[in-house]
């Protein structure tokens, strides 16, 4: 029985080398380049903001991380300090609501219960595989956060081919007026492609080695 379950898990994960996790009025925020440590990168647009203006700047970061399978796509949002480091950060993403492998396997065939908050490793930069940070004004940020809260409230199921973590993040991106790639990419490829499709020359972000 254990051998059969192991084979089912292996076949399911091999059969779908993708996963992840409808849009409103568009928001087109300013894009700022960041280096691998999450601070403003060399070559990013310079500003003359005063400390009062810099304190409490708002952001959303589209991010993917490595995992034992094909990875995970999610967003981090909050404020950055004067050094460009994240503060008051929150995480939103879609994943099966279990630490067991069983829902992941079943979720390749049928919808399974989902959770939409932080999962293990989301805030650990050692596991980050790709990212794209977008700076927002306070009104833009409030609008995005309101959309995320609503999306979380109505996202009850995860299904690998239809409603995965890429689809969840894509809904957020489209609510901001961005184009989105297909949801069947690996998370690292999804975030990298999202950045390339929308960010322009300043959307350097980060892409790590293939996982």
Image (cartoon, rainbow, N blue to C red):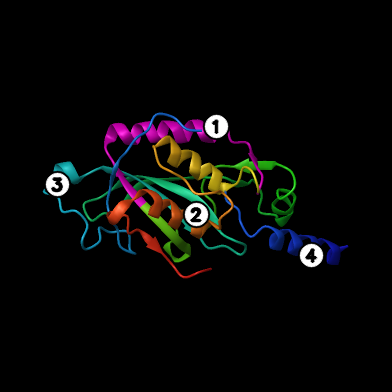
Q: Taking the image as drawn, is residue 3 in sight?
A: yes
- Please report whichever mark, 2 or 1, sits nearer to the chain's N-terminal start: 1
Mark with earlier residue (4, 3): 4
| Circles 1 and 4: CB atoms closer than 8 Å | no
Residue position for label 1: 153
Left or right side of 39 for 17: right
Q: Nearer the viewer, residue 36 or 81?
A: 36
Q: Upstream in the sequence, badge 3 or badge 1?
A: 3
Circle 4 residue: 6
The numbered mark, 1 or 4, whose residue comes first in the sequence reads: 4
- Residue 13: in magenta span: no
Question: What is the C-alpha distance between the residues marked 2 and 3?
Answer: 35 Å
Q: Which residues are magenta?
A: 133-160
Q: Comparing marks 2 and 3, which lies closer to the viewer?
A: 2
As measured in the structure, the alpha-carbon distance from the residue carrying label 1 to the one carrying label 4 is: 34 Å
* Residue picked out by circle 2: 190
Label whose residue precedes the other's in the sequence (4 or 2): 4
**Does the segment drawn in magenta span residue 134?**
yes
Q: Position of residue 139 (x, y in %)?
A: 29, 31
Disc 2 packing (10 Å; few <14; some 14–19; many ≥20): many
């Amino acid at each position: 029985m254990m051998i059969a379950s192991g084979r089912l898990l292996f076949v399911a994960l091999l059969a779908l080398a993708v996963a992840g996790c409808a849009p409103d009025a568009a928001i087109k925020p300013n894009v700022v380049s960041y280096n691998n440590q999450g601070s403003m990168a060399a070559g990013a647009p310079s500003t003359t903001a005063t400390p009062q203006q810099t304190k409490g700047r708002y952001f959303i970061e589209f991010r993917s991380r490595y995992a034992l399978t094909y990875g995970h796509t999610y967003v981090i949002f909050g404020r950055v300090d004067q050094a460009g480091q994240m503060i008051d950060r929150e995480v939103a993403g879609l994943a099966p609501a279990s630490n067991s492998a069983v829902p992941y396997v079943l979720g390749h065939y049928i919808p399974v219960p989902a959770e939409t908050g932080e999962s293990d490793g989301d805030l650990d930069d050692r596991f980050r595989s790709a990212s794209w940070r977008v700076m927002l004004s306070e009104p833009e940020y409030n609008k995005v956060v309101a959309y995320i809260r609503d999306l979380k409230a109505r996202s009850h199921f995860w299904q690998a081919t239809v409603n995965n973590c890429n689809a969840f993040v894509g809904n957020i991106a489209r609510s901001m007026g961005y184009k989105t790639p297909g949801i069947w990419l690996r998370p690292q490829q999804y975030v990298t492609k999202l950045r390339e499709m929308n960010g322009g020359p300043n959307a350097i972000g980060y892409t790590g080695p293939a996982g």
